[in-house]
Image (tube, rainbow, N blue to C red):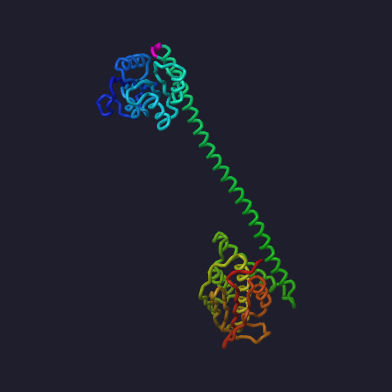
Amino acid sequence: MQIKTLDAVDPSSPGNAAAGERPPTTATILVVDDEPMALQMFADLLQARGFGVIAVARGEDAFQWLDAVDLVLLDAMLPGRDGWSICREIKEKYDPLLPVVMVTARTAPDDVVRTFEAGADDYVAKPFHAAELTARIESRLRVHRAERALQDANRQLSALADQNYTLYDQARRDAEERSHLLRELDHRVRNNLSVIMGLVNMERNRRPPRPVGEALASLESRLRSFLMVLEALRRMNYRTVPLREIAEKMAQRLRNSMGLDERVELEITGSVPGLDERQGFALALALNELISNSLRHAFPDNRPGCVRIHLAEEREEMRIEVSDDGIGSQPGERSGVLGSGRSIVEALVRGELGGQVERLPSERGTRVLLSFPRTPPAA
């Protein structure tokens, strides 16, 4: 849509494009000149060469059209605010890349310098030749398009650089995470193998040695407890070990494996906060020994009974009590909660947890208390 006016265009007038709306032509020129005849002449000339034209007579009216045009043809000698002042404001406050061609009768060196210092991209001297004016306008439009294309390319390159940096940073963090996971995996494998070898060595160094079948069954039970903790850790994303859940599952597994589910009850009460990996493994193995010994030795001759496990935290100290109402035992005897696994339990609680194993008085059966600090000792 081509627009030609001799006075300032009213954006709300019917038939005129609204301010900021770009006419659908190859290029649109904003002509600013206070002389009606000059304004008409510029408009006719530019339209004849295929340009869209917006023409205004006052410099102040130019600002509302800047978003709609590709070039400003600006008379230097405007009444009120001159063209140099208008040009400077366009470049400083609106769009420094929008080409401005000044039209001036003053071509002395100082005036030319003043024109370029105001930010003009080119100038045309009055009186002008139509071919020269058109050539200068087309030249500035080519430069303008190139500048816009370069600006768009820089914007795209900047976005691509940001994207590449984001991808690089993500790749770096992924690599660091993989490296950390590999180190953590190596650490876990070494620790787990150390625990397993420790269990094997305990059984091998046992005096007097147990029959092979009994020793293998005991070792299998310990390994199952170990795997139970591993499974819980995996499910909890290796954050904490849910001890009560481990104790419940372990006690049920041991009771069922010994065929005692019909005559020995299990009672598990209380709770403790989630434990770390080291605490979880040590306590699971210790509980395996205590529960196994209680089920195996406290209820002979088809005697019914109950094994109780109570979990509590008191003043930053964890307290795990395992008791039964079986036949009880005297110090040094093999029956009851501690029984033959005493050395293993004490090694785990004292060595791994920095805690104590205490046999408590009981009117019936056996009671053993494991206590250790909430914060584990340094490895």
Classify 46 as above or below 161. Answer: above
Classify 223 as above or below 319. Answer: above
Image side of residue 230 versus residue 207, left or right: left
Predominant secondary structure, magenta span: loop
| Residue 234 spot, x, y in % from top left | 57, 60
| Residue 176 spot, x, y in % from top left | 61, 50
Question: Residue at the spot x=45%, y=28% of the render?
Answer: 97
Q: Quadrant of the C terminus?
A: bottom right
Q: Is residue 129 magenta?
A: yes
Magenta span of residues: 126-130
Image side of residue 107 versus residue 12, left or right: right
Question: Residue at the spot x=68%, y=84% of the render?
Answer: 332
Residue sitting at the far bottom = 363
| Residue 127 spot, x, y in % from top left | 38, 12
Looking at the rendered structure, the number of numbered marks drawn on it comes to 0
- Residue 311 in sight in this render: no
Viewer-side residue, 370 vs 247? 370
Viewer-side residue, 224 vs 55? 55
Q: Quadrant of the N terminus?
A: top left
| Residue 287 spot, x, y in % from top left | 60, 73
Among the 4 quarters of the image, the one containing residue 310: bottom right
Among the 4 quarters of the image, the one containing residue 218: bottom right
- Residue 55 in sight in this render: yes
Q: Is residue 356 magenta?
A: no
Question: Residue at the spot x=63%, y=51% of the render?
Answer: 179
Viewer-side residue, 211 vs 362? 362
Classify 19 as above or below 33. Answer: below
Viewer-side residue, 259 vs 45? 45
